Image (cartoon, grey):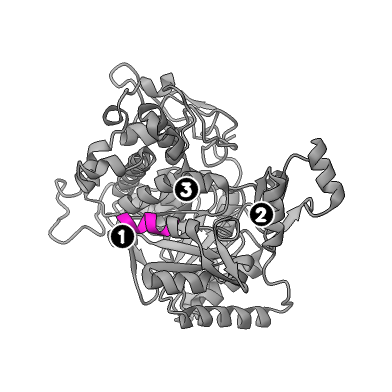
């Protein structure tokens, strides 16, 4: 059994409130959580959490030595005792230059127009769920300051009561505007704001609205599902009036709030909430060629609106859909393809569907590399890719980049990048009570898990003065604590990734290869084509012995 993600980690002093998922996060992550999983704690103490606690009084050893099953945790990272690849100009292989702070995490993606980023991470789609709206300022400002992409998910306009849709087209979209403008306020050329489209968004004219108002400041994204579900996205509402509003907006609402018996059941308390569902895409098409033709027309239309950057998000479907996504996106010269493996989910995905449907992340991503290689072997260019589905820690970021190299440029993270927004907002609600309602703070006092670290923002957030240096002292009053927490956690991920890359002697992202990871059981070797750990360099080792 892989013991890495047991409920508590005595070495780091972390504890999961609930059951630990493959990512190391709790299977159920609460916005009001008082701690303290690894991601939660690293949102305050940052890179300190890379190391065992209580230095000087402890020794520590790993418990992750037995690898059973096929997952990212059954891969390990290969280290080397010599060499240096990708050092910045002016640096040499001298030990004084080959240090982990010299690892360059900056990169770019895109077909013709390149989008730069400072770290190889991006958010999952943060759409119409209320939790995304509540904590958007923390997420967006944090991403903008760090310099990584953020995705506005589906249905944001459709569920906004203040939006106006006339004759099937948006004329006013205050919530969408708020989300885009918040990110752009602090955007400095690194990262991007990505706006996602589903069936309802397409019908409502989201693309046309964004193109007219924001032009090439935004990337537009087509959606083919996600790793948590094989149906459209859902939210849950507790108001009959709001449910009826969503029904009139054209959504599938379950149960139907327009039925008299449902209204009576709600009045009597037998029904307390309604689920709003989006539609499946592509159901009017029955052949691959027809899907391809429709897809290419959609891309051409988006380009005609003025979008210079277009991406595609696909979910944990089977091999045919995966091949279609990679091939069609490459043929259409799209800028990014995000491939979301099963097991993820940040919204209201049906639980047993999340547990049972789709291709698990490692298997899906291994096939994505195989299919991309087939296209590349023909001399054709392959779309830049982002892998998603159960990532939260720096080691799995490295593994996923290596598994998909050289095609994978980014790792998409959902809940792992939302936790600092929750935590920072809860802290701000206590330390700045006048802001509690604005930031959706859940606490009345700092729990001991936080007060043990400090009692002011300057004490609690290890990266406070890094952010202050970037924005200035005067602007700090406008930076939500959730963004401070985001920066702090991203700094921990970046530092940890730099250390892993330095150990692999790779000082730039584009130097990471599949040779930097190994399989720790034969089944993983079979499914990923990543060689078993003792087979890697075995022949060259024997040449040394026989030399």
- Image location of residue 264, percent across then percent down: 84, 43
- For the question of whether residue 270 can be seen, the reply is no
Magenta segment, which residues? 179-187
Along the line of sight, which residue is nearer the eye, 276 or 523?
A: 276
- For the question of whether residue 439 can be seen, the reply is yes
- Of the numbered discs 1 and 2, the one sitting upstream in the chain is 1
Q: Name the residue under label 1.
A: 190
Q: Mark 2 points at which residue?
A: 229
- Image location of residue 154, percent across then percent down: 57, 60
| Label 3 to label 2: alpha-carbon separation | 34 Å
- Of the numbered discs 3 and 2, the one sitting upstream in the chain is 2
Q: Mark 3 points at which residue?
A: 533
Pointers 3 and 2 in contact (C-beta within 8 Å): no
Q: Residue 520 carries which label?
A: none
Residue 50, picture quadrant: top left
- Image location of residue 34, percent across then percent down: 48, 27
């Amino acid at each position: 059994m892989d013991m890495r993600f047991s409920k508590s980690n005595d070495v780091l002093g972390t504890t999961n409130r609930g059951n630990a998922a493959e990512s190391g996060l709790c299977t159920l992550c609460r916005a009001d959580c008082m701690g303290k999983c690894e991601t939660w704690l690293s949102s305050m103490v940052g890179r300190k959490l890379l190391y065992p606690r209580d230095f000087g009084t402890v020794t520590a050893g790993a418990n992750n030595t037995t690898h059973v099953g096929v997952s990212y945790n059954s891969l390990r990272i290969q280290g080397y005792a010599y060499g240096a690849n990708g050092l910045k100009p002016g640096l040499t292989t001298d030990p004084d230059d080959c240090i982990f702070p010299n690892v360059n995490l900056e990169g770019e993606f895109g077909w013709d127009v390149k989008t730069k980023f400072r770290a190889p991470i991006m958010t999952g789609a943060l759409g119409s769920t209320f939790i995304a709206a509540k904590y958007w300022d923390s997420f967006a400002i944090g991403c903008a300051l760090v310099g990584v992409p953020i995705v506005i998910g589906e249905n944001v306009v459709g569920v906004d009561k203040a939006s106006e849709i006339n004759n099937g087209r948006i004329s006013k979209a205050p919530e969408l505007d708020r989300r885009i403008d918040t990110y752009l306020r602090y955007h400095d050329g690194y990262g991007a704001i990505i706006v996602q489209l589903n069936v309802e968004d397409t019908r409502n004219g989201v693309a046309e609205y964004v193109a007219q108002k924001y032009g090439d400041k935004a990337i537009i994204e087509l959606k083919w599902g996600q790793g948590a579900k094989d149906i459209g996205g859902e939210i849950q509402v507790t108001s009959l009036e709001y449910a009826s509003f969503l029904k009139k907006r054209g959504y599938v609402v379950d149960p139907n709030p327009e039925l008299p018996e449902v209204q009576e059941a709600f009045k009597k308390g037998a029904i307390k909430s309604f689920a709003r569902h989006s539609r499946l895409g592509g159901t009017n098409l029955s052949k691959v060629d027809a899907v391809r033709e429709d897809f290419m027309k959609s891309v051409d239309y988006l380009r005609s609106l003025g979008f210079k950057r277009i991406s595609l998000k696909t979910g944990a479907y089977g091999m045919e859909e995966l091949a279609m996504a990679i091939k069609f996106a490459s043929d259409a010269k799209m800028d990014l393809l995000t491939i979301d493996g099963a097991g993820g989910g940040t919204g209201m995905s049906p639980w047993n569907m999340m547990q049972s449907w789709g291709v698990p992340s490692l298997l899906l991503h291994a096939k994505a590399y195989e299919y991309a290689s087939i296209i590349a072997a023909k001399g054709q260019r392959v779309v830049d890719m982002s892998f998603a589905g159960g990532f939260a820690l720096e080691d799995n970021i490295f593994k996923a980049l290596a598994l998909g190299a050289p095609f994978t440029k980014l790792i998409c993270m959902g809940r792992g990048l939302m936790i600092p927004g929750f935590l920072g907002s809860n802290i701000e609600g206590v330390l700045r009570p006048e802001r509690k309602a604005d930031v959706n703070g859940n606490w009345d006092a700092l729990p001991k898990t936080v007060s043990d670290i400090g009692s002011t923002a300057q004490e609690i957030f290890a990266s406070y003065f890094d952010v202050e240096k970037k924005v200035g002292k005067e602007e700090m009053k406008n930076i939500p604590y959730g963004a401070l927490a985001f920066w702090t956690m991203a700094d921990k991920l970046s530092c940890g990734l730099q250390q892993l890359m330095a150990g692999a002697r790779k000082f730039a992202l584009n130097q990471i290869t599949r040779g930097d990871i190994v399989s720790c059981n034969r089944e993983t070797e079979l499914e990923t084509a990543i060689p078993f750990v003792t087979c890697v360099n075995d022949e060259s080792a024997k040449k040394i012995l026989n030399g």
